[in-house]
Image: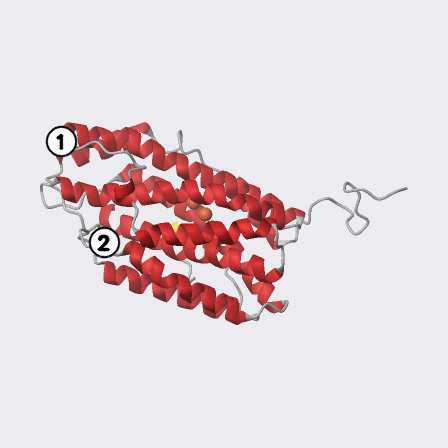
């Protein structure tokens, strides 16, 4: 009988339950959450009321608004940019995982869209501030645009070039810089400012706790822990199989100034030097792990664990 794409004599079952990718996929299914129902309406209503009664200038409100615009656009961009990886990745268990990641990036984009519509715009209206669109060009610094444009090019290249080097570069752009260093640094800054121990003070001098925002971001950070772990696992494998580690190191260090240029915001009250240090340290630690083929990555359950606004994994 002729072979076809449905038959495969090297496999006795379709999926490999012992593969790391299958474990990651099962973790994604188990930890599924709904960006509409699982972040309760009451929490968003409470965030809105707290922001309306906060003593603030339009410029201070814009710091929060700008951060949320960057995240909303980023999640939309990565949803769009991931599809070529699903086509290039080959292995079926990895394909299952990448489809779960695509769905999760789409859910992240949906959460930020919901937050803007239900919290940000009503606060601007109530306070007499200019109502702005999350797509307004004012929110996107050149460094941000450049880092997402480069990521898009690295991902699109996979449509024509599925070589191990092209895959390694794609993972470096997408999983290790954009959604690891850039996104996690930004989420860390939001959680530092708007959680119970946060830096942002309300009218009575108490930190303002935006529980709806922090709840959404905690769920998103947990998903991102799994995505980043998958990328690190793949880059480590590609290096072990012969990709020159210099490709990884060069790609990451070329992108780091763009990360710094994105998180630095002169209008922000958050200490951006500390954020850039946090980003640099995270990236340095990751380079060490993925270029050391003997280094063990933490299990996926550890990578998705976000506690008290902090990810507890050492990567
Ligand atoms: Fe995401
Ligand atoms: Fe992600």
Image quarter hosting the C terminus: bottom left
- Asked if residue 311 shows in the view, the reply is no
* Picture disc at residue 127: 1
Q: Which mark is residue 265?
A: 2
In this view, the residue in front, 313 or 162, is 162
Nearer the camera: disc 2 or disc 1: 2
Who's the residue at 14% across and 39% down the image? 58
* 39 sits left or right of 162 in the view: left
Q: Which mark is first along the chain, 1 or 2?
A: 1
Q: Is residue 114 above or below residue 137?
A: above
Say few, some or many: other residues with alpha carbon within 10 Å of mark 2 (under 14 / 14 to 19 / 20 or more).
some
Residue plotted at (41% across, 68% down):
284
Residue 102 x %, y %: 51, 41
Q: Closest to the observer: 85 or 280?
A: 85
- 217 left or right of 18? left
Residue 279 sits in which quadrant?
Answer: bottom left
- 32 vs 158, left or right, is left
Q: Secondary structure at mark 2?
A: loop
């Amino acid at each position: 009988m002729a072979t076809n794409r449905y038959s495969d004599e090297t496999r006795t079952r379709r999926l490999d339950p012992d593969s790391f990718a299958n474990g990651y996929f099962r973790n994604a299914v188990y930890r599924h959450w709904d960006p509409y129902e699982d972040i309760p309406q009451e929490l968003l209503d409470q965030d809105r009321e707290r922001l309306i009664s906060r003593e603030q200038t339009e410029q201070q409100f814009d710091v929060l608004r700008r951060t949320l615009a960057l995240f909303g656009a980023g999640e939309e961009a990565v949803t769009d940019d991931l599809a070529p990886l699903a086509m290039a990745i080959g292995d079926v268990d990895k394909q299952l995982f990448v489809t779960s990641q695509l769905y999760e990036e789409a859910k992240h984009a949906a959460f930020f869209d919901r937050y803007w519509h239900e919290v940000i715009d009503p606060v601007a209206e109530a306070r007499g501030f200019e109502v702005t669109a999350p797509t307004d060009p004012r929110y996107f610094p050149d460094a941000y645009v450049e880092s997402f444009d480069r990521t898009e090019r690295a991902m699109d290249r996979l449509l024509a070039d599925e070589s191990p080097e092209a895959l390694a570069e794609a993972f470096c752009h997408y999983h290790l810089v954009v959604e690891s260093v850039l996104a996690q640094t930004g989420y860390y800054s939001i959680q530092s400012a708007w959680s119970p121990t946060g830096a942002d003070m309300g009218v009575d001098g108490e930190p303002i706790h935006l529980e709806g925002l922090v709840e959404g971001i905690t769920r998103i950070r947990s998903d991102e822990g799994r995505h980043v772990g998958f990328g690190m696992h793949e880059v480590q494998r590609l290096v072990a199989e012969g990709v020159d580690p210099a490709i990884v190191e060069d790609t990451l260090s070329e992108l780091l100034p763009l990360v710094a240029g994105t998180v630095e915001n002169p209008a922000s009250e958050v200490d951006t030097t500390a954020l850039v240090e946090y980003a640099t340290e995270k990236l340095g630690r990751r380079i060490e792990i993925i270029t050391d083929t003997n280094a063990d990555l933490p299990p996926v359950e550890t990578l998705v664990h976000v506690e008290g606004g902090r990810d507890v994994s050492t990567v």
